[in-house]
């Protein structure tokens, strides 16, 4: 429909309607649809993003409810799948031996792993999560915190300082929590800086174990951390979709189901 005589508010309402109908919108398509410049459309999308009703992306926008770009807070995540996370954490802790160095990224499942490791007498935990460091304070576990810029949603430290610190260290095992696990496309997180830190973690770990409840399978998020083949093992729960379980085993990845 032509935009002749259309008010900004009317056009933006229609953009939202198209977004909800199609699941995404592209700047070039909207410019053609409304017969106006791409610059004007970009301004519309930036306005809607500022109002918190869409998530702006390169070349377009996604609806907030699409989930690909959502980054829920740690407190919100803690309420989800608690039983499964506890079982996953217990299974992960059984793989850790005294004297090892363990790398934990931020997240509720890795926080549960930290709790399960509290009683070990000789262990070094490297983490970029300040809540995990606090969890282990006062125990016999030696904690190395990366430093970096604090992300309030996840209590994690990210950015060049965190990455540089990690690359000076080495870990026996990395327990990596993810927001999305697509057996074809790889492992995902909604935050770009977090994905960079996660990649640095994979580089310094002798062994990478993905820890995630079954709800994470078949989901993608904004940032791809790494391909599935970079993982040696996955710990998840019994509700993992059978096609995903089969795909992991076909890729030669050890799967522990709790």
Image (tube, rainbow, N blue to C red):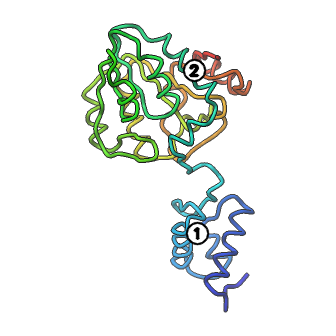
Viewer-side residue, 233 vs 99: 99
Quadrant housing the C terminus: top right
All told, the count of numbered labels is: 2
Residue position marked by numbered label 2 in the rendering: 88
Residue position marked by numbered label 1 in the rendering: 27
Viewer-side residue, 1 vs 233: 233
Which secondary structure, mark 2?
helix
| Rendered location of residue 66, percent (x, y) | 65, 52
Quadrant housing the N terminus: bottom right
**Residue at 44% from the left image edge and 23% from the top image edge:** 114
Which secondary structure, mark 1?
helix
Q: Residues within 10 Å of mark 1 (few under 14, many from 20)?
A: many
| Rendered location of residue 141, percent (x, y) | 33, 17
**Residue at 36% from the left image edge and 35% from the top image edge:** 130
Residue 172 vertical position relative to residue 146 in the rendered view, above or below:
above
Viewer-side residue, 233 vs 108: 108
Residue 213 vertical position relative to residue 142 in the rendered view, above or below:
below
| Rendered location of residue 211, percent (x, y) | 54, 25
**Residue at 43% from the left image edge and 18% from the top image edge:** 207
| Rendered location of residue 106, percent (x, y) | 44, 34
**Residue at 64% from the left image edge and 31% from the top image edge:** 81
Q: Residues within 10 Å of mark 2 (few under 14, many from 20)?
A: many
Q: Which mark is residue 16?
A: none
Which residue in the rendered view is the most extreme toward the front? 138
Q: Is residue 241 left or right of residue 113?
A: right
Quadrant of the rendered image containing residue 129: top left
- Front of the two marks 2 and 1: 2
Q: Earlier in the sequence, mark 2 or mark 1?
A: 1
Distance from disc 2 to disc 1, alpha carbons, whole Å, reads 43 Å
Quadrant of the rendered image containing residue 15: bottom right
């Amino acid at each position: 429909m032509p935009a002749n005589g259309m008010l900004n508010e009317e056009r933006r309402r229609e953009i939202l309607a198209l977004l909800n109908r199609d699941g995404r919108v592209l700047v070039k398509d909207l410019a053609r649809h409304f017969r106006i410049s791409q610059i004007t459309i970009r301004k519309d999308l930036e306005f809607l993003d500022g109002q918190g009703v869409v998530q702006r992306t390169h070349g377009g926008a996604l609806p907030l409810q699409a989930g690909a770009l959502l980054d829920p807070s740690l407190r919100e995540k803690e309420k989800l799948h608690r039983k499964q996370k506890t079982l996953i954490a217990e299974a992960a802790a059984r793989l850790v031996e005294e004297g090892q160095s363990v790398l934990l990224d931020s997240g509720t499942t890795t926080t549960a792993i930290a709790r399960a490791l509290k009683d070990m007498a000789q262990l070094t935990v490297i983490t970029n999560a300040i809540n995990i460091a606090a969890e282990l304070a006062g125990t016999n576990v030696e904690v190395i915190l990366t430093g970096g810029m604090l992300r309030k949603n996840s209590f994690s430290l990210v950015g060049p300082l965190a990455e540089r610190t990690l690359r000076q260290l080495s870990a026996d095992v990395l327990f990596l929590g993810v927001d999305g696990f697509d057996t074809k496309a790889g492992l995902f997180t909604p935050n770009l800086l977090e994905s960079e830190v996660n990649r640095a973690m994979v580089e310094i770990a002798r062994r990478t174990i993905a820890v995630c409840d079954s709800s994470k399978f078949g989901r993608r998020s904004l940032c791809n951390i790494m391909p599935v083949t970079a993982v040696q093992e996955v710990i998840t729960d019994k509700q993992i979709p059978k096609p995903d379980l089969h795909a992991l085993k076909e890729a030669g990845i050890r799967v522990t189901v709790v």
